[in-house]
Amino acid sequence: MFSLPVWVAVLALVYLDFPIRVGTAAICAHGQECHAPSLADLFDRVIQQSSRVHGISSELHSDYEQYFFPSKNHIGKRKCHTYSILTPADKENAQRLGREELTEVILRLLGAWGDPLSQLHRSMTQDQNQDFNHYSSNKALEMSDMVHELRSGVTKVAEKMKLLGVISNALGYMSSPESLAPSSVSSSYERGDFNSIDHHDLLYCFRRDSNKVKNYLRILKCTTLPELDC
Amino acid sequence: MRRAVGSVPLLLMLFFIGHAKETRYSPPGKPKLTSCRSPEKETFTCWWEPGSDGGLPTTYALYYRKENSDAVYECPDYHTAGENSCFFNKNDTSIWVNYNITVVATNALGSNFSDPVDVDVVYIVQPHTPENVTVTVMEDKDGPFLRVSWEPPRKADTRSGWITLIYELRVKLEGEEEWEEHRAGQQKMFNIFSLRSGGMYLVQVRCKPDHGFWSEWSSTTYIKVPDYFPRETSVWILIAVFSAFIFFILTWILNLKSNSVKHCLLPPVPGPKIKGFDKQLLKNGRSEEVFSALVVPGFPPTTSSDCEDLLVEYLEVYTPEEQELILEEGKDLQEGCLKSKGSPSDSDSGRGSCDSHTLLMEKCGEGEGKEEKHQERAQKGKRQQKHQTGWEEGDVSHTREDVLSPDMSEGRVKTWPSVFSPLPQYSSRPLDHQGSLETARQLCLSDSLFPPPSTSSHLSYNAKEGLALGSGQQEFYLGKKQTHPSNPQSQPRWHLQAHSDFNISSMDRKQAASGLQLPGFRSTEYVEVQRVNQEDMVILQPLFSSSCQRDGHLQIGQGEDYSKVKGEDGDSCYTTSTAASSQVTGKPTSCAGTAMPVQEEMVLAANGYVDAATMLL
């Protein structure tokens, strides 16, 4: 109904606008000199994000534990799919690791959980337990999204650190983080036949790994920027 | 020998077994792991609770397994942490690893395993209390405040970021019960404001890892806040001083001008302005004295020296039923009481000056009261016994039972205030033996007001038919209305006004017994209005004959220069003076003296009397 020039104009605007949106624009007011967030700010953001992720995972896990497994200590023989990722199990080992490796471990962990979390969410929504799973599936979705964001955030932190010369450029894993997860374990997830027990185990594993991530990030921050509240 | 030695343990064992059976030894009870705690996330300790020992010495052992490993290890350290505990040092502690811990109690008879417990060190961290809690008082522009600072527990490694602690502190005043708690987050310093001056404060701090247990409260730190003066108080003091200053000034000014203020707020009460009235006596509270002081010795004049000034005025009311003569005696009015009805028209048209309460009495003080009293009495049908104490009635006896007393003969002439307007005036002439004459202000229609057949015993005038006053249906009120309720007649009544204090005397001829004689009257000259000439002058003639007399009608005395104008019911002899407003249409019946309706106002003498002498004769 509109004339052709109008359509052309609209399309032009859309296409012109698109690259702008795609490219990352600094959110700065006019006339203000744009400052990229400092390393300290980045660290604070990712640490807060990881703390939130861990909080949600703890909630979900305790929900499952109360709802399905009232008796405590039902750990059973589970094996988390990230067990192959070697993570420092105490402070000395973590400090001995160094910044680059620590960053790498973090990224590995975060990468290994991307898919399983979305699968968990999908499985939860399909579950028969409507009330419980509906509420929990939202959390799982949120968790999954946040992990993605956290991963990109940590990547930015690493880039920033490289920029600042804090860490060397000898990091090769970042190109393909998805391949970190052991295939055997991921295949079981890809099977898709999760049940509640699987959910519970998965949540247990993720809770622990998110705690690791949070802790490693804090160590990373405090070794890199010791002056702030460490 | 060896065999003997070898058999000893066997014997001993048999002995023990025999003994054991007697003393009921049993295998140990089940121990129970109570808690495991890590203070810094690097080591941890587990405690257990032993069960019954079964009477035998029991040993306890703790075994653990790590996650995803089947190797069973025993507790490395049973002593560091005390009794019934197992301490895991740094080398044996792994974080984010699941420990499966079991305690075994063993005695000679057996062993007992506790329930296994899964422990992940990350979630059992309970730090020590914060250290070096220092509180100092610092000054600010708003006042002092407390600065609390502390350090993390020694063992917790927060500097490397290995453990993150959040802190909480609580404060209270000494002697209080409730603590005031504050979350301090990760910071190691906190400020407390709004302190009480001179108060002693108690401060405590504790901490917790982001996922773990709260530590114990640190030992109390005492701090005393120095005395200081709060700024708000000083402002209030300033305001108070200023207000007090202003208040004092106002009070002083008020004091200076107290008189004018008093005059403005409390105006003086006007006192009585009666001649001869003594305020002091009134204040003393003796009313009798006050009133007696008002009595002027020369007043009222008892002698008829100046009869012209005074006219006695009274009315006689005849009540045929009761055959009573109601006397009402008027009082002597001072000359001053006379109010010249100069106005030709009686302002209270339709009402005679009988009701000239205000007119008559305005200068006569308390006389009014007495008149009213009189009227009341008359209402009851009693004789009027009016005597005014203050007044000297002279020979006029007011206390009359039923007869028109001879006192009447004293020459009191009753003047009826004219109903409508001042009747033709009569000049008052002194009567020799009369009492005080009062100068009534008006002449009043009397007869017309008499209801001979009326049953009313009170002073009331009945407007009869033919009343010059007007139609019989007309009602005229002289003053207060006193209608006898039982009077069936609906005739209008004339009511006497008390204050006009008339003595209504109705003479009943038949009441011979009553002695209603009119000797006294004889002494008085009554004039009847014969007619009214064209000039609207009332022609009066002395009433000698009884042609116009009626039973119960008052005779008009003779020989008087003044006449009492009365109206006779149904008869002539009406003297009517009509006020301008009233329409008196007397319908005089046959009578010798026909009353003429007076169409117009009469000329009134100053005293309200129609001077018969001048007019008629």
Image (cartoon, coloured by chain):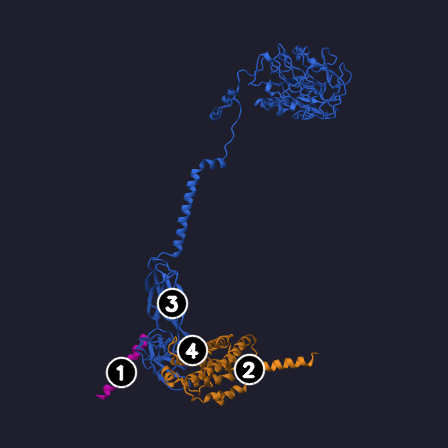
Q: Please tell me which residue lies in front, A51 or B98.
A: A51
Q: What segment is highlighted magenta in the picture?
A: B1-24
Q: What number is the disc on residue A22?
A: 2
A27 and A46: which is toward the camera: A27
On what subunit does the disc labeled 4 rest?
A
- The chain to which mark 1 is attached is B
- Give the image location of residue B547, x and y in percent: 75, 12
Q: Amino acid under label 4?
A: Ala
Q: Nearer the viewer, mark 4 or mark 1?
A: 4
Along the line of sight, which residue is nearer the eye, B511 or A222? A222
Q: Decide if residue B115 is in sight here.
A: no
Q: Which chain is orange?
A: A
The residue at the far front in this view is A31
Image location (x, y in percent) of residue A149:
50, 80
Give the image quarter of residue A217: bottom left
Q: Nearer the viewer, mark 3 or mark 1?
A: 3
* Element under disc 3: strand
Per the rendering, the mark at residue B11 is 1
Label disc, if present, on residue A40 of the rendered structure: 4
Q: Are marks 4 and 1 on the same chain?
A: no
> Which residue type carries mark 3?
Phe
- Of tags 1 and 2, the one toward the viewer is 2
Chain that bears disc 3: B
Question: Badge 2 sits on which subunit?
Answer: A
